[in-house]
Image: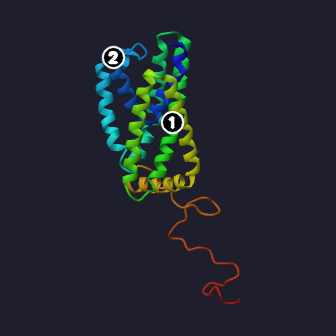
Amino acid sequence: MGAELIPMAFTTGWGSGINAYAVVLVLGLADKIFNLSQIPNALARTDVLIGAGILFAVEMLADKIPYVDSVWDSVHTVVRPAVGATIGYLIGHDTASLDAAVGAATGGVTALISHGIKAGLRAAVNTSPEPASNVLVSTTEDVTVTGVTALAIAHPWLAATIAFVLLALGAFLVYKLAGRIRRYKRRYDAWGERIGISAPSGRRGPATGAAPDPGTAPPPRPDVRPGQPFDQET
């Protein structure tokens, strides 16, 4: 494996951070059909392909629905890096234990970064009032991950270069769209409270930090006697 380990692990890690099941499907089907030596045989197992296919279909639907896609991303904060690390480990497992460790670290860290960028960008997209942009971005992600992962099988360094450019571009867009992401987070938190998936945040009092009691009247101003209008001199 040698020189192909790092670019392959990096590319599959990047793809796993966006759509882990697409990466497993592309690699597994390629090995199943063409019996490629650079792809771990475990990914071509029938049960792995069936499971990845079902989850890929579920993700295709969930990833295109505003707010639902963010719930899905939250659940996959652990899943995507784990898949990226596992694929990286399997890629280097046939050569040496050190290669396996390097592959796992490369795939896992890259997948975590890629996942964070994806979640941030989708949060910014979800601030749009219409759903078409969400569907367009999700479809573009699926097609790009599939294409770059397939390219990595034949040209790992070229695919890794493309993945790195897309990762850097995504990080730049997240930085530029930080304001929209913060607005979306407030809306997402409010939506979570309405449907009961997050605890009510409450409004904090200015001094103690405790939520004010709605049945308690605010204290009178020191320069105004009770019952006297605020604009009247004392």
Q: Distance between the residues labelled 2 and 1?
A: 29 Å
Q: Which of marks 2 and 1 is nearer the N terminus?
A: 2
Return the residue nearer the eye: 78 or 151. Answer: 151
Q: Is residue 36 visible to the viewer in this orientation of the structure?
A: yes
Count of residue discs: 2
Q: Which residue is drawn at 62% across and 84% down?
A: 226
Viewed as shown, does residue 75 lie left or right of 169?
A: left
At label 2, the amino acid type is: Phe
Figure quadrant of residue 55? top left
Horizontal and vertical percent position of residue 22: 37, 31
In the figure, residue 151 lies in which quadrant?
top left
Which of the pair 91/109 is nearer the observer? Answer: 91
Residue 196 appears in the rendering: no
On the image, the x and y values in percent for residue 70 come to 43, 46
Other residues around mark 1 within 10 Å, as few (<14) / some (14–19) / many (≥20): many
Residue drawn at the location 35% of the way across and 39% of the way down:
59
Q: Going 42% across and 39% down the picture, which residue do you hit?
A: 75
Q: Taking 204 as reference, is 162 above or below it?
A: above
Residue position marked by numbered label 2 in the rendering: 34
**Residue in the picture at 34% in, 14% down:** 35
Query: In x, y percent, where is residue 129?
Result: 41, 59
Q: Work out whether residue 196 or residue 134 is closer to the camera in this orientation and state it.
A: 134
Looking at the rendered structure, which numbered label has been put on residue 87?
none
Mark 2 crowdedness (10 Å alpha carbons): few <14, some 14-19, many ≥20: few
Residue identified by numbered label 1: 114
User: Colour scheme used in the picture?
Assistant: rainbow
The amino acid beneath tag 1 is Ser
- Element marked by disc 1: helix
What element does badge 2 sit on?
A: helix
